[in-house]
Image: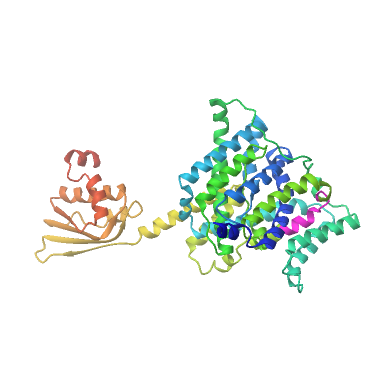
Amino acid sequence: MYEKMKLSWFSNLKGDTLAGIVVALALIPEAIAFSIIAGVDPKVGLYASFAICVIIAFTGGRSGMISAATGAMALLMITLVKEHGLEYLLAATLLTGVLQIVAGYLRLADLMRFVSRSVVTGFVNALAILIFMAQLPELTGVTWHVYAMTLAGLGIIYLFPYVPMIGKAIPSPLVCIVVLTAVYLVTGMEIRSVGDMGELPDSLPIFLWPDVPLNLETLMIILPYALMLTVVGLLESMMTATIIDDLTDTKSDKNHECKGQGIANIGSGLIGGMAGCAMIGQSVINIKSGGRRRLSTLMAGVVLLLMVVFLADWVSQIPMAALVAVMIMVAIGTFSWSSLRDVKKHPLSSNIVMVATVVVTVGTHNLAIGVFVGVLLAAMFFANKVGNILYIGSEEAEDGAHRIYKVVGQVFFASSERFGEAFDFKETVENVTIDLSRAHFWDITAVQTLDRVVIKFRREGTEVELIGLNEASATIVDRYAVHDDPAAVEKLMGGH
């Protein structure tokens, strides 16, 4: 137990501590920005990021992953806040947490196995594009100083690791933030800083139960929003966990993560924070800065709160250009550049799925819709591909009165039409044998098509024998087939 705890928390002390500080600095402007998007006070996003980070460090199923207030979640809150106010948002946050815990116990995270690698790649690329696009307001209509500072920041981030002795010891994003802040303070240049984003809180969060009526009407107001927040939050968290799994070559417990996200959101709602989820940008910052264990997530939350409450005067002086440089680094590091090289090598269907996921996600700014479209397209392409793997051959017996059809492949909704059209019902034979020993029937559509084939042969006066059904296929055919039931046959064939 002690060794396991030591490995999870304290096996990477320096790396996790420094990475946590970098993440905390990057979280501040984003939490403020997401609060503004949702239409609430900056304190709501900052308190949420603190609470979710700290709680998920203990309850999450993926060490080294950062969870906090996010833009994807904030976009879903706009209408609720505008029409009903902050108190209903806090109530929706609590309900979101409960639903996510339920999802964890129902093991809904196991559905992630139906998300293809093409969808994950598209999701990653779309997030990288969205992260970059989110920085454009800070680079539009500004003076040359901002561009100079941003370029200098990128230079520090990418070149500092090559400095002998200390290059690998200190995270370059942290060096970037410290150096550019010092330059900003010394020169006094007129550029935006964190303080310009909004007022930072001046007190620690307190317990805050939502002031809403506990009745069915309230539930009907918050339930649709809570459901959307639950789906988007878990989807983004599961996808981010998959990406961090790949970056660190380790595994995560995604159902455990669902429960952890739920507990964290409940904790956030109880101190006046908004719902949140895993953040791919900050998670990548954490990993790239050397964070690996739960301590890095805990440090990010604790340092965030300490800085915004006790060091607000200093934190407010951090130039936005420094944080923009860090986020551009994240966008560049997140984008799967190999996916561009692989376009020529990968099947057209995989490329279409990847591009569609990117386009829909970027176009709607909704990760859930983008992933849904990608999964749907991947399923359709897969069904079409498997449906085409169907061969039906035939041979005539020596007496000329008997034909044997041999079916090879999968028979289901996508291939049932081909199956039904492969037989010659007008041929003058007394007996037909359909050999299904190398076929598999998957669904009701396949069974109904088999019924029609048998019935059509019998109406032409041909005796039909089915042989070779495997156990699984025989079970579904015996249960749903109606070709031996005269009344059901008439109903199936439309009474004709």
Describe residue 149's horizontal placement relative to residue 9 as left or right.
right
Specify the farthest residue to the front: 2
| Residue 348, percent from left and from top | 49, 63
Q: Main secondary structure of the magenta part?
A: helix
Q: Which residues are magenta?
A: 315-326
x and y percentages locating residue 55 in the rendered image: 62, 46
Identity of the residue drawn at 75% across and 50% down: 137
Q: Residue at x 55, y 64 (%)?
A: 249
Rendered view: 95 above or below 476: above
Q: Nearer the viewer, residue 26 or 205?
A: 205
Viewer can see residue 496? no
Tell me the quarter of the picture where residue 423 sits: bottom left
Q: Is residue 150 left or right of residue 6?
A: right
Q: Is residue 96 left or right of residue 381?
A: right
240 is higher (above) or lower (below) than 341: above
Residue found at the far bottom of this picture = 164
Count the numbered circles shown.
Answer: 0
Q: Residue at x 67, y 54 (%)?
A: 131
Task: Indicate the quadrant containing the N terminus: top left, top right, bottom left or bottom right.
Answer: bottom right
Farthest residue to the left: give it: 399
